[in-house]
Image (tube, rainbow, N blue to C red):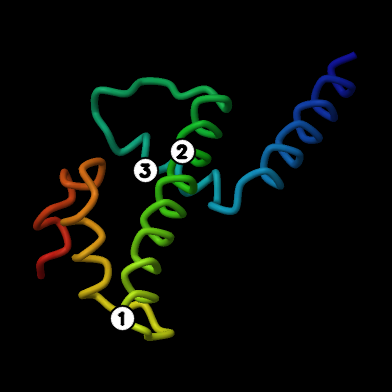
Amino acid sequence: MTEEKENLDVAEEEKSEKLVKLPLSRIKSIIKMDPDVNLASQEAVFLIAKSTELFIESLARESYTHTAMAKKKTVQRKDIDAAISSSDSLLFLEGALDS
């Protein structure tokens, strides 16, 4: 019975890994770096990974909109900065990309 449970856990983990493109193991290790976090369930790690992917996709789409308006094909740093400045939902990133 224990072997069946392990097989189900492995199958479930493989299925969830296919649903996200970011490495779940890396995200889990980043979560564990926070001293306030004692335990992170696999579901929590999956949700953080999926949320991160959706956030990156949103930022990329918004940045590409500014790239297309400038009639260019390559997204540049100035396009990302313009996307951050023009979108209220991205304003928290203002200055975050400064080197």
* Position in image of residue 12 (x %, y %): 76, 31
- Which residue is under mark 1? 70
> Mark 2 against mark 1, which lies toward the viewer?
1
**Picture quarter containing residue 86?**
bottom left
From the viewer's side, name the closer residue of 59 and 98. 59
Badge 1 density bin: few <14, some 14–19, many ≥20, Cα 10 Å: few
Local SS, label 3: helix
Q: Residue at x 26, y 66 (%)?
A: 80
From the viewer's side, name the closer residue of 96 and 77. 77
The kind of residue tagged 3 is: Ile
Local SS, label 1: loop
* Position in image of residue 24 (x %, y %): 55, 44
Q: How far apart are labels 2 and 1 at the CA level?
A: 29 Å
The kind of residue tagged 1 is: Ala
- Which residue is under mark 3? 30
- Which residue is under mark 2? 51
